[in-house]
Image: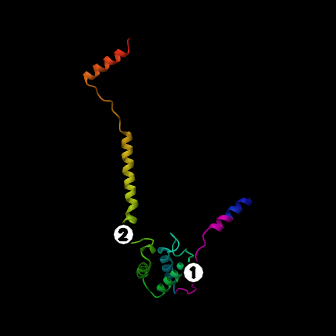
Amino acid sequence: MMRIWFIIGLFLLAYPAIAIDSNPQPFADAMTEARYKELLKELRCMVCPNQPLSDSEAGLAQDLREEVREMVLQGQSNVDIKTFLVARYGDSVLYNPPVMPKTFLLWFGPAVLLLIAFFVLVYFIRRQNKVVSTPVLTPEEQEKLTQVLNQRDPS
């Protein structure tokens, strides 16, 4: 029983702490706060790979959360906020970067690899299932084969 509690304790210690916004400035209404939280989920922390801005504990993430909060409180739209952050940090700040020539591989690469894998699989399945037919002998070849077999077998 003690071992189970120990394992549970280890899991709880390993669970990443949720970043807490240190800015105590409240929002005017619940819709603005919900928009702010949703926006933070759409933005990527520049320090922590594959972690949304809302969950990161990095100092830069805290600064970005405060900056986004100020922009939301000033009434800027989500598009304006994202445009500002992309101009400052590049497309990698967005979890869903726009489709453009430099992100084609990111958007279409998995589908292309899946198609290639499908065609390779079909090719190997067809190749393996190809029935090897026995060649049909001409009458001359059949007679020659019979002679060779009769010479080996004196019965």
In this picture, is 56 found above or below 3?
below
x then y, percent, for residue 59:
56, 79
Tell us which disc is closer to us: 1 or 2.
2
Q: Give the residue pinned by disc 1.
A: 21
**Residue visible at 53% across and 82% down in the picture:** 63
x then y, percent, for residue 155:
38, 11
Q: Which mark is residue 102?
A: 2
- Tell me the element at label 2: helix
Q: Characterize the magenta stretch by its predominant secondary structure.
A: loop
Front position in the image: 71 or 103: 103
Q: How many other residues sit within 10 Å of disc 1, few (<14), some (14-19) or many (≥20)? A: some
- Tell me the element at label 1: loop
**Residue visible at 70% across and 60% down in the picture:** 4
Front position in the image: 89 or 42: 89
**Residue visible at 53% across and 72% down in the picture:** 48
Whole-number angstrom distance, CA of label 1 to CA of label 2 = 34 Å
Q: Which residues are magenta?
A: 9-27
Q: Is residue 36 magenta?
A: no
Would you identify the image quadrant in which residue 62 lies? bottom right
Disc 2 marks a residue whose amino acid type is Lys
Q: Is residue 75 left or right of residue 21?
A: left
Q: How many other residues sit within 10 Å of disc 2, few (<14), some (14-19) or many (≥20)? A: few
Q: Which mark is residue 50?
A: none
Asked whether disc 1 touches disc 2, contact meaning CB atoms under 8 Å apart, the reply is no
In this picture, is 17 found above or below 31?
above
Q: Is residue 95 left or right of residue 56?
A: left
**Residue visible at 33% across and 30% down in the picture:** 134
Quadrant including the N terminus: bottom right
